[in-house]
Amino acid sequence: QKELHTTNEELQEKAQLLQQAEVESQRHPLVLNERALRMLKTGNFAGAAALLEQAVEADPLNPEIWFNLGDARRKLNRVDAAVEALDRSLAINRRNVTAFLEKASLQELQRKPRAAAMSYRNALQALPPGFKAPQWMDDQLKRAKEVVDANNRALESYIEEGLQSIRARHADEPLRRFDQCVEIVLQKRSIYRQQPTFMYFPELPAIEFYEREHFPWLDSIEAATDDIRAEYLDVLSTESEELTPYVANAHMGEAQELVNSRRWSAYSLWRQGVAIPEHIERCPRTVAALQARPSWDVPGSGPTVMFSVLDAKTRIPPHTGPVNTRLVVHLPLIVPSGCGFRVGGQQREWHPGKAFVFDDSINHEAWNDSSEPRTVLIFDVWSPLLATPERELVRALTVRIGEFYGTMRPSEGGRDEGGI
């Protein structure tokens, strides 16, 4: 493909260099490989295969030579041997999309549809992010997707048929995690891991939405929903100018249009661990309702408590928070239809008065497709899986890091405060 854009002078120079290399080192594996490629172009497949056999013997760790040998063997209709050569190439370089595609097409010739589907799947998974396929690869990738999708559908039916009796025995048990496992196997669900932008605490599970039994204090906060909503509406009617852009003076990538914009605004009671007395005084029933929570009290970082307002026709792009030692709670107050929220592979709607807890170090996003603003009370709490000594040490560690960098706080390292 590259030679199509090469000038005649460059081709002549290349040929002269090759002739010189052949004279000086006729048995060098790269020389043998180049000679074999010329033979492949002229239809001398047997001669090319013979040279490539010599080349891989001299340089068995060169994946390109193994790939070319697979190509030569295929053209000789030696399908099994071609697959063997491609396996040797892929053992050295597992990211070679073309080799996986070639292997899969050969496995289809071998009438091995399941093996071909796995090779096509490997090819698709090896594509780098943002990959733009060249035109000559379009049909191959289309075929790969078709085969993988068909194989997944067949596998899903086969799995469910074999699990029916076991599911029936456990019909009353929560099987959500297992169902997610099956969806991942079938490529119906992506794997989302914790990716905090500031601090990662090992061995905390990557749970997207937590079950309520970990948070017995949620009931009392939900019971105060009407009082909390009333205080917000009072603020809105008398101090609407106090709702400030949630993101100010920052680089937000895809969300740059929301920087310094009231389309995503907040009325904060605490922000990054700093109390705002006049706002707290305006919302005494909200503050009282939150007393029972295990506040994420990390100097310079938390707690954060706010009324978060997402304007009509506004979307917050996918992003991750700064740490996985805290969790974020949403108590929906005003939710028009057309609003949604996703954490990892799970999507939920907000329902007024029904709180949920999620791990914002996992990729998440929010949207309001309605014609009215959406308002949620947001606050952060400690992960219930962090022991008391660990919490104390995390506080101290965060402070020490901030002191070391002077003015730098986690927010300045790309942190999201959980206001979404």
Image: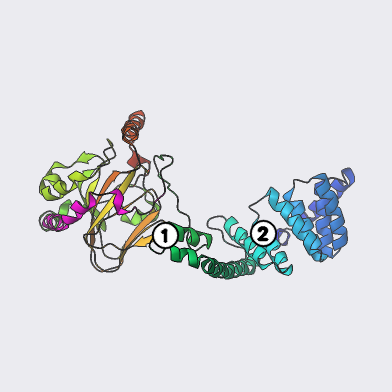
Residue 194 is one of the magenta-drawn residues: no
State the image coordinates of residue 168 (x, y, percent, origin top left).
44, 66
The answer to which of 214 and 418 lies nearer the viewer is 214
Query: Which amino acid type is marked by label 2?
Result: Phe
* Residue 372 lies in quadrant: bottom left
The residue labelled by disc 2 is 100
Q: How is the image coloured?
A: rainbow
Report crowding for label 2: few under 14, some 14 to 19, many 20 or more residues within 10 A (C-alpha). Answer: many
Residue 305 in view, yes or no: yes
Query: Which amino acid type is marked by label 1?
Result: Leu
Circles 1, 2 touching at the beta carbon (< 8 Å): no
Above or below residue 154? Residue 259 is above
- Residue drawn 81% across and 52% down? 33
As helix, strand or loop, the secondary structure at mark 1 comes to loop
The answer to which of 285 and 277 lies nearer the viewer is 285
Q: Which residue lies furthest to the front in this view?
A: 169
Q: Give the CA distance from mark 1 to mark 2.
A: 35 Å
Residue 31 in view, yes or no: no
State the image coordinates of residue 238 (x, y, percent, origin top left).
10, 55
Q: In which quarter of the image is the C terminus?
A: bottom left
Q: Quadrant of the N terminus?
A: bottom right
- What segment is highlighted magenta in the picture? 205-234
Q: Say whether disc 1 or disc 2 marks the residue closer to the N-terminus.
A: 2
Left/right of residue 115 with respect to residue 382 in the rendered view: right
The answer to which of 15 and 86 lies nearer the viewer is 86
As helix, strand or loop, the secondary structure at mark 2 comes to helix
* Residue 308 lies in quadrant: bottom left
State the image coordinates of residue 261 (x, y, percent, origin top left).
27, 55
The residue labelled by disc 1 is 175
State the image coordinates of residue 37 (x, y, percent, origin top left).
80, 57
